Image: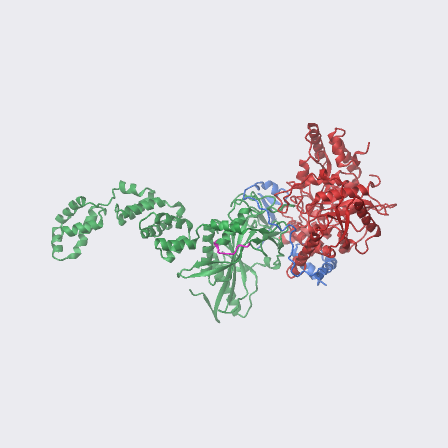
Chain colours: A blue, B green, C red
Amino acid sequence: MSSIDEKTIEKVANLARIEIDPADVSYFADQIKGVVDWIEQLSEVDTDNVKPLAVVDETSITMREDDITDGGYMEDVTKNAPESAYGFYVVPKVVE
Amino acid sequence: MSYIIEGRTGNWEMVIGLEIHAQVISNSKLFSGSPTDFGADPNSQVSFVDAAMPGMLPVLNKKCVEQAVKTGLGLNAQINLYSAFDRKNYFYADLPQGYQISQLYHPIVGNGKIEIDLEDGTTKFIGIERIHLEQDAGKSVHDQHPTKTYVDLNRSGIALMEIVSDPDLRSADEVAAYIRKIRTILRYLGTCDGNMDEGSMRCDVNVSVRRPGEEFGTRCEIKNVNSVRFASQAIAYEAARQVEILEDGGTIKQETRLFDANKMETRSMRSKEEAHDYRYFPDPDLPPLILEQSYVDAIKANMPELPDEKKARFIKDYGLKAYDASVLVADQARAHYFEEVAKNCKDPKLATTWVSVELFGALNKSGKTIEDSPVSSDYLVELIALIEDNTISGRIAKDVFAEMIESGKKPGDIVEEKGLKQITDSSSLDPIIDQILSDNTDKVEEYKSGKDKLFGFFVGQVMKQTGGKANPKMVNDRLKEKLQ
Amino acid sequence: MTNISDLSLVELKEKMTNKELSSREITETYIQRIEQHKDLNAYVMTDFDRALDAADAADKNYAAGNAGLLEGIPLAIKDLFCTKDLRTTAGSKILDNFVPPYESTVTSNLKKDGAVFLGKTNMDEFAMGSTNRTSAYGHVISPWKANGSSEDLTPGGSSGGSSAAVAARLCVGATGTDTGGSIRQPAALTGTVGMKPTYGLCSRFGVVAFASSLDQAGPMTRTVKDTALMLESMAGHDPKDSTSAKVEIPHYAGLMTGDVKGLRVGIPKEYSIDGLPAEISALWSKGAEWLKARGAEIIEVSLPHTKYALPTYYVLNPAESSSNLARYDGVRYGHRVESDDLNEMYAKTRGEGFGNEVIRRILVGTYVLSAGYYDAYYTKAQKVRRLIVNDFDAVFKDVDVLLTPTSPSTAFPLNQDETDPVKIYLNDVFTVTVNLAGLPGISVPAGLAEDGLPLGLQLIANRFDEARLFNAALALERDAKFTAKPEGF
């Protein structure tokens, strides 16, 4: 059984940048725990010497030529932005 | 070279490893067809892929793969025929996808090593752990607005090679030599322009300290180290900081620190702390990259001569000293210039002096690079030829060279215009000598009576009369004969 | 004459070619029907002006004798496909104002072949769901009702807007996407044909990514032949998608004879799950008998890792989606909740923009990829996935296609209050294996259950064996003789 509790949910939600109403944390904790506990049945499967599979087609990737074929449409890449100025996307000040 | 830090409680040693992020030279980005030029208008070099619009997919640029393989070969490294791309997940304003496509589990290049040249003439091998391909992030501009950050994605998606060294470096000097050597090799290969000012080469430095001979200590990663000088400063500061903490009985916290070049200090980047779980996993949009050995061999067969090979050849062919040779080959353009001159001269020693001392000296004085040298290699060859065939003397040659630097004129023309040709026939020289001897009969008498030192006086007079154009050997010979 | 809205794609094409009908008449018929049945909430956005322009252009092409494969055929597009200058939401509030400046490859292909787009269909948010209840734009109501009941039913999901639109005759065909069954399950629940092609056959470029290694676009129509025609247009190699297969797309419809003599049909014994309703088992057997009667050979086969397909899927799918959905951060497009702190802006934007099922999957995905759990969950699931692929590879040495039920039940009421996500995930039990192995699968309506609701049977073939799959499906369709229609449509 997984050890998922409300703390886990808070940590994971923070990693995923999702604000969860404090009142809902226990709801999500129960549900996520339920899903993960169910997933844990995979541990029954003997996977010794089995290579992980990431994509169904494991033959090599197809590459493109090094040609400039795209870009040059600042308007189009910024017109859906909630906030933009002088061609930049605008976000709250980032302090480092 | 000593690299011991003397603390209050004894000696410490620094252990340093570098991650160099080198922007790959390519026309278009790693996974999209937008251009890679520096300094364009904000978001003008951004495709829907680079802006991570919904449903956009990466397509790998062939050239970037070739450049990484070339770099791997240039750093004497293992090329991994099987590599794959992974996603490094984190949130940042200039990371549009919410992940960076990188290669954690299967990098394209494995172990390698390079030899660095230190100022005391010794060399040292530094191990390369790996090189992987990854996407560059965009740029955040923080100083345009009091409460806002502006984001430009032009750089987003340009290919980077992350070159990770082993923790083999032990001093700031070694780090500087290592960075310079990597930069030279990348420039020779044409895989990165090495321009740290424009950010096309950037370093993260991992620093720890330990008592000599003991286990590695806990390390801190210093980001934003964007010149060789800053690297030295950041390391010195960070090592001293760690020694002080340890000597006070404290422990080092593994963390990411930022180098502040204005304050010359490093400080903790708390923003990176909380989100240090990058959740790497294979990028399902990109099948594995499987290369054929024949592909690698073909790149190998077309490798340019690298600095170490060139250095060895310069020592052998042109009789250079090891350190002079390593300084010369550090800059590909200078090395090329030298070679153009040296191979066209009878005496390579003359070429060495004229290029390394005279020309580089003049360029340094005027702050010019070899690329905009007013004296072409052809002209310098011509000047040296004029010395070698006795048309002008070495002393006159310096005047001609100064004129060449000034005007860019052909040395032969300068010699011709100013009548600087060496006097090498006795029929022209004899009347001048005769005149001097008859004007100075008293000195001739003194000389003949044993005051040998006066010989120099007669030589000086001849040179003065001929404006230095007389061939020194002939002057000697004729004077000796006439004074007998 | 039959109602225009009851004609198949093949029939409509024939009538337009013979000048018996114009695309404008057909399109207007569908527009009228969409207006009439707005209460189903099948469409989240309609685009009638451009649809009529496209219909007129199609009529000109018929007149000029250069009609494309789908010339003048009114289709609906699942709102997961980006459509240039037409709002695309993926069923999510986080994209409620997003107007793509580009077109997906699949919809470009359809347009090139002359198709008329009526609008965008509703769906589970980011395709996460099998009920259509997770849409931020309200759930879709199936046109079907159970015998003697007026209760609203699910059209299935996530392509529930598309399945409802096809079943209610609000379009001739629709695009869907299928990550774990999202085309085949809604097709089964609405008495329509839904097909998920081999992974890589249809480009994913411009389709809002859900779980990249599993996502495939596919067609949904009312007949097998119509589905084949639509797929022919949608599929094809695309250099903009690195996982796009380099295969030639044949004219499937021309290869379909319905002759299945000698076809080896596998019946995977592990699909006889506990609690499978008897009528579904019975229909499954009937399907096998139909094919046998036409000369096919029925062979019982074993896919030993079937049991683990769902948990495997529910590791890989959330992991990939947690990363794919990281780009919805309120910076470059979509919904934003303002804040003067960047991280707070992200968290509020995403907390408010995503619905609960999306949040659940992102949390699970983030958890299984996080430090300390990656190997136990993610790598483990990738290994089991290989075993599942190996199971299919072994079986396809002995059989040509597999026959299974599509869904373990008929459509259930929309207000059925199921809160256990695992129970909801079980709807995908017969369909996820196909996605994990990247195989083509098709659901064919095969009969009505006792409650009067449609049931589907699924055929699965080996990778890129679509032609054989369609042929077997045609045989099944001929014997099933499914002519039932939702009442009032």
Residue C197, given in percent of the width and then of the height, sits at: 70, 45
Q: How many marks?
A: 0
Residue B78 colored in magenta in the image: yes
For residue A35, say whether it is visible.
yes
For residue C412, say whether it is visible.
no
Residue B137, compared with residue A40, is above or below; it is above
Is the N terminus of chain B in the top left, top right, bottom left or bottom right quadrant?
Answer: bottom left
Q: Is residue B462 left or right of residue C230?
A: left
Extreme-right residue of the structure: C148
Q: Main secondary structure of the magenta part?
A: loop
Q: Is residue C191 left or right of residue B309?
A: right
Extreme-bottom residue of the structure: B9
Residue C226, given in percent of the width and then of the height, sits at: 74, 39
Residue B147, compared with residue C171, is above or below; it is below
In the image shown, does C227 or A4 lie closer to the viewer? Answer: C227
Residue C428, given in percent of the width and then of the height, sits at: 75, 51
Residue C481, compared with residue C273, is above or below; it is above
Magenta stretch: give its range: B74-80
